[in-house]
Image (cartoon, helix red, strand yellow):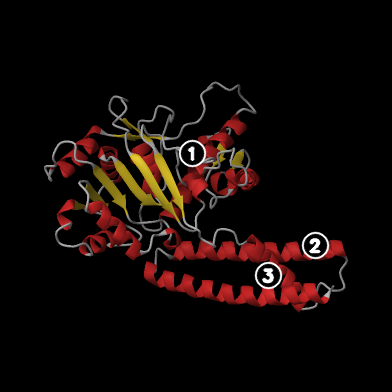
Amino acid sequence: MYPLLQGNPEATRVLPIFLREVDPFQKGLKGLMDLGRNGRYDVCLNFFVHIKAKNVVPHGWGVFDIVSNAANVVHHEKDLSRLNHFISMYYQFTHDVLSLVAPMVRQKPFKGVSVWIGDAAVEQAGRFISKEELSPGRPIIMYNPDAASPYTLLPFPIQAELLRRIADTEAFVLLAAGHNETGIGERLKASLPPALQPNIMIVPASTPLEVYSAMIDFSDVFLSADTGPLHIAAARKYSRTNGRALRNRTAVLSFFGATPARMSGYDSFQAGYLPSNQDAPSWAFAAGSPCRNIMILTWLYGATLAKHFGLADPFTIGRRVIFIAGGALGLGMYLGSLSIVMHRIKHFFPMKLLGKIYRWLGIGLIILSFYFIYNFLRHIVGTR
């Protein structure tokens, strides 16, 4: 994201601390601590949940962490009259913290973020697209078939059918090659009938992010699951050279599986969604995934374990509540730690192998769920 932040007039200084190198996270943490130790900043705002206050400054003082805003996120998710997009929450969090020490200057409501693109990247993107010598007025659709997580990735057969229907129109398709799901773009194109394949151009995975962003701005429609390019597509795009607004007429269509659509998606029509920052509509489709809310299962785990092992029987009502809440919290922390570990090791193991591990873990949790629910219902019936 570093190239897309350079030139933003609201950022006095942009520092490229976290870069794609060998073990970038640990190296970036060291650079962040050096900056916090030597920079003498009065206030630090931390928006990354995996970075602790002591990672910013040794004593952790003066660091405001976005995690402290978690209660608002949970509350807003149930209230469709409020935005619950993580970007708008970051904006509100920053406003609330800074309003403690300074009067509010900006009165306009939050509309979304912006990215800044150099003229060379715009020219390179234009040359890439112009190789096809498209007829004037022919629609351009850019399709990102990748996703940040395999659990929000559209199944391949569905993507292949979707791409076939798009390619069978007058539109020309820029198809991303894929990063997390390596080679998915080429496989999707190969699945099409030969007569439709000339309507597809693969955007190589080696394309610089700045050029990729300019290609999005050339497109009339951008399609994606929940991943980084989706937020670039929704952002307002400006020239880094002279500050002028670029085309900004890209409609954004997004698909969500296990991740909450209101927290990451953009929609101009549905209540509680943040629209994209484009002069074009946006729409988010949320699949009926059963994986979004495991809190009730977590509570059942704690309750049935307590009963099964006979640990809760001698407790008073208050102590049983504390015991069950503690068990649920412990299991939730375990699942959270497991997800962090799996996220870290995905850089060292193929995604297909991790997918199999996740699948068997899911099967194990489903089996345990039925076991715990069965014992929990037996407990309820037996106490009546």
Q: Quick check: marks 3 and 2 in contact, CB under 8 Å?
A: no
Query: Secondary structure beneath disc 1?
Result: loop
Categorize mark 2 by other alpha carbons within 10 Å: few (<14), some (14-19), many (20+). some
- Inter-mark Cα distance, 3 to 2: 13 Å
First reached walking from the N terminus: tag 1 or tag 2? 1
Residue type at numbered disc 2: Val
Q: Quick check: marks 1 and 2 in contact, CB under 8 Å?
A: no
Q: Mark 2 points at which residue?
A: 321
* Residue 68 occupies quadrant: top right
Nearest-to-viewer mark from 1 and 2: 1
- Horizontal and vertical percent position of residue 211: 26, 42
Q: Which residue is drawn at 30% across and 25% down?
A: 244
First reached walking from the N terminus: tag 1 or tag 3? 1
- Horizontal and vertical percent position of residue 292: 55, 58
Q: Name the residue under label 1.
A: 274
In the rendered image, the quadrant that contains the N terminus is top left
Q: Which residue is drawn at 49% across and 75% down?
A: 360
Q: Which residue is drawn at 59% across and 38% down?
A: 81
Q: In the displayed structure, does residue 50 sit left or right of residue 133?
A: right
First reached walking from the N terminus: tag 3 or tag 2? 3
Q: In the displayed structure, does residue 101 sit left or right of residue 384?
A: left
Categorize mark 3 by other alpha carbons within 10 Å: few (<14), some (14-19), many (20+). many
Query: Secondary structure beneath disc 3?
Result: helix
Query: Secondary structure beneath disc 2?
Result: helix
Q: Name the residue under label 3.
A: 301
Residue 154, label in figure = none
Placement of 71 over or under 195, stated as above or below: above
Residue type at numbered disc 3: Tyr
